[in-house]
Amino acid sequence: MTATRAVTRPSGVRIWLMAARVRTLPAAVAPVLVGTALAGYLHVFHPLRFVAALIGAMFIQIGTNLSNDYSDARRGADTEDRLGPVRVTAGGLVPPRQVLIATYLTFGVAVLAGVYLIVVAGWELLLVGAASILAGVLYTGGPRPYGYEGLGELFVFLFFGIVAVAGSFFVQLRHLDWEAFALAVPVGLIAAGLLVVNNVRDIDTDRRAGKRTLAVRLGRDRTRLMFVLVLAFAYLLTPVTWLFGPLEPWLFLPWLTLPLAARVIGIVHTRTDGASLNGALAQTGLLQLIFCTLLAAGLLLSR
């Protein structure tokens, strides 16, 4: 640890907020809003199930972040020269054992929320919850972490898009409709875009650490192009359930966020410094939250 970091050591609460990476929580909240709003379009809403789904999603996200912090430090991926925020394990702010215990406790809260949902909505959610936690742990943990093999964006798309939106819809109605999967696609694409920005920022340090993310495999320029395509398809696919289904043109409401998307794309395409890309990451999280809130509003206005 450098002398500067020792002098500016944050408070205990701030350290744990850093470890939880609260800026990533929109990725957990957004799909629950969309899946629940689709159920609301069908005039079904169970408030306690919604709260439990929200708690489960957020604590799985926090547990995943803590697990990644611990695992990346053990593998030497979080070095002093990384451009992103300090990681608490690698930075020596919290002993590894405490981070590991916090990971177990956080996933425990998610499990408790999941138990309630299993009781009220069906055993199928046991599989969803177990797969989500396992995916979170194995992102950078285990013998062959998929995040080190360029599969991170795919898993984010699946679990923060398809699984989360369809699962939140299932929690309310105990069955699945095709619209849930169609709406999950743009949600998952923007969630994957979050990881793309993160990996563009860390491309150099990840390469040196042997972390072969998709950005490392593709290179900076092609990854930047991928980011544009991911966001473009998110917007283009949003009105599918209006074009081919029963929903209304209110589904175009998320297009109001296009100026924010353009601003983020501009930063990602022109900047390589950590401060700018950290800002772009935060703005992408904000983009996802506003995009999905407007999508949820469009669904409810279509009733």
Image (cartoon, grey):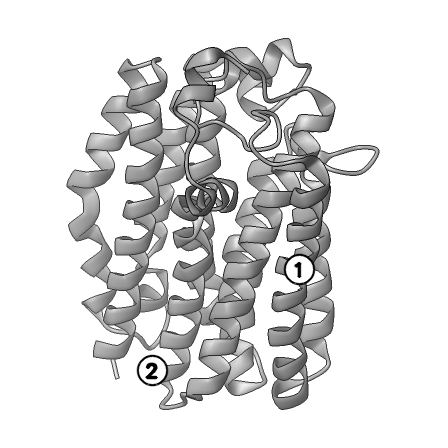
Which residue does the image show at 73% across and 41% down from the upper left?
Answer: 97
In the drawing, does residue 160 fall left or right of residue 100?
A: left
Which residue does the image show at 47% across and 51% down from the upper left?
Answer: 188
Q: Nearer the viewer, residue 36 or 83?
A: 83
User: Given this view, does label 2 or label 1 mark the residue nearer the observer?
Assistant: 1
Name the image quarter holding residue 108.
bottom right
Which residue does the image show at 42% across and 86% down from the upper left?
Answer: 47
In the drawing, does residue 144 fall left or right of residue 225?
A: right
Kindly identify the amino acid type of the residue bearing the numbered disc 1.
Answer: Leu
Q: Nearer the viewer, residue 275 or 164?
A: 275
Q: Quadrant of the C terminus?
A: bottom left
Name the image quarter holding residue 132.
bottom right
Q: Nearer the viewer, residue 127 or 6?
A: 6
Element class at badge 1? helix
- Relative to 215, does residue 256 appear above or below in the rendering? below
Q: Earlier in the sequence, mark 2 or mark 1?
A: 2
Q: Which residue is mark 1?
A: 105
